[in-house]
Structure formats: C-alpha cells, structure tokens
Image (spheres, helix red, strand yellow):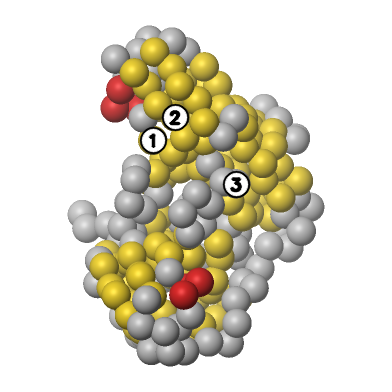
C-alpha cells in the first residue's frame, strides 16, 4: 500500500528565511508525485507534478525535487502570503487511480 | 476559464439523513474523483469516474455512492449520515483520468452532521 509521510508537521519562518519541506514516500511503481498548497477551508491548489528521480520544477519562490524515496519543496525567501498547508501526494501503478496524501506541513511565515 | 465547481459550499444535516453533493469538472476534462478531508488530515480517496464508469474506489462503506453524467459532471451521495461523516468533501477533475495525470481540485463542500 502506498504511504506518504511529510515533515515537519509545522514550520514557522521569518520572512526571507529559506527552508525545505520533506515528503517521504513508499510506493510500488511511482506514476507521479504531486505537490499542492491548501489555504484554510479551501480546496488544494496544484503546484507541481514530478515523475522521475532527478526531476526538478520551479515556480516563483518554490522549487520541487524528487529522489527515489523522497521529495523536497524548497521555499526561497518566503513571504507571509506563502503561509498555507503544503500537501504531498503520490500515485502508483497499483493505486486504483487514487492519490495518496500525506498529512501536510503547516507553514507560517511571519513578517 | 472556470475551474472545478462544487455545490453547495456548506451543508448541515442530522444523523440518519441523506446528502447529495455536486461537482462540475474543468471544461474538457472527462474524469472526476471524490475525496474526503477531515480536519488535520490529508484528503482520502473515495471514488474515481471516467466516461460515466467507476474506475476506482477507496475504503469507504456502501453508504457512499457516486455517478457521472454524460456532461461529465458528478454527484456524490451519502446515505444514513453519521457524525463521523462531517468533513470537507473535495472533487477533483483530470483530462483523461490516466495514471500520472494532474488532478485539479474544487473548493469543496463543508458537511456538518449533527
């Protein structure tokens, strides 16, 4: 069964203080790893899809990387508006089409 | 362009009642998936539909059912509501429902069961 573990559960940063969020996963036959951002009471907003080890994608202050066992979401010089819960999800060959999510990392960026 | 839309936004029901949640996918998307998210947890997969056929089902009881219409919109039905069914219900759409395709989520329906 697919498993996703995200760490830390919560992270507080000062504006401009760069850091990384971790997503460790166990799957049989990865078909995609997905990062989403979720604001309180809203639906997840798509950020990145990664397919193979070594792949990297960037968008503004965010950069996602992938290895065979984990993915990192690097946040460079964060701003208060980056505060949200960041969710990682995987989909595998035997997943019955479902996304398996981690519990998320709650990021708070203080001005 | 309109994203995934869901209705209603909020709903309050009592135990034992029935509820129907609705979802319209992004224009051109043929697959819809349903997820349940309780506070502090990641979304949990309930169903995926593609071209009106159920292609995947999560570990939810038979009280949960869904269907997809010819225009690719979808309904999630929950019978005999329990207190534990209180959650944010999310609908996600993708173009072809294939493995590895990005799923785009709607704003969700917040269900409270009293």
> Would you name the residue on which mark 3 appears?
A102
> Would you name the residue on which mark 1 appears?
A84
Secondary structure at numbered mark 3: loop
Give the chain letter at badge 3.
Answer: A
Secondary structure at numbered mark 1: strand
Residue at coordinates 52% horizontally, 17% vertically from top-left? A19
Cα distance in 3D space between marks 2 and 1: 5 Å
Q: Residues within 10 Å of mark 3 (few under 14, many from 20)?
A: many
> Would you name the residue on which mark 2 appears?
A107
| Tag 2–tag 1 contact (CB < 8 Å) | yes
Residue at coordinates 67% horizontally, 41% vertically from top-left? A5
- Above-or-below relation of B97 to A65: below
Where's the N terminus of chain B, which quadrant? bottom left
Indicate the quadrant where residue B29 lies: bottom left
For marks 2 and 3, the one nearer the N-term is 3
Cα distance in 3D space between marks 1 and 3: 15 Å
Query: Residue A89: percent from the left, percent from the top?
Result: 58, 48
For marks 1 and 3, the one nearer the N-term is 1
Q: In front: B1, or B36? A: B36
Indicate the quadrant where residue A46 lies: top left
Where's the C terminus of chain B, which quadrant? bottom left
How many numbered marks have been drawn onto this rendered protein structure? 3
Query: Residue A48: percent from the left, percent from the top?
Result: 48, 38
Query: Is A96 on the left or on the right of A11, as rendered?
Result: right
- Above-or-below relation of A87 to A77: below
């Amino acid at each position: 069964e697919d498993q996703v573990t995200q760490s830390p559960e919560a992270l507080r940063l000062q504006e401009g203080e760069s850091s990384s969020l971790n997503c460790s996963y166990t799957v049989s036959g990865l078909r995609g790893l997905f990062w989403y951002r979720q604001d309180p009471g809203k639906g997840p907003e798509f950020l990145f899809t990664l397919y193979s080890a070594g792949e990297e994608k960037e968008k503004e202050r965010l950069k996602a990387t992938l290895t065979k066992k984990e993915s990192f979401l690097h946040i460079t010089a964060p701003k208060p508006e980056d505060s949200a819960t960041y969710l990682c999800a995987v989909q595998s060959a035997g997943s019955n089409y479902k996304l398996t999510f981690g519990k998320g990392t709650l990021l708070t960026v203080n001005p | 362009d309109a994203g995934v839309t869901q209705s209603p936004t909020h709903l309050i029901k009592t135990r034992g009642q029935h509820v129907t949640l609705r979802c319209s996918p992004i224009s051109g998307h043929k697959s819809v998936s349903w997820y349940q998210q309780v506070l502090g947890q990641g979304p949990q997969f309930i169903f995926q539909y593609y071209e009106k056929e159920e292609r995947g089902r999560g570990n939810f009881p038979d009280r949960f059912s869904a269907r997809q219409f010819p225009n690719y919109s979808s309904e999630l039905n929950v019978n005999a509501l329990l207190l534990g069914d209180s959650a944010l219900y999310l609908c996600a759409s993708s173009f072809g429902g294939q493995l590895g395709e990005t799923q785009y989520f709607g704003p969700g329906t917040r269900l409270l069961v009293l």
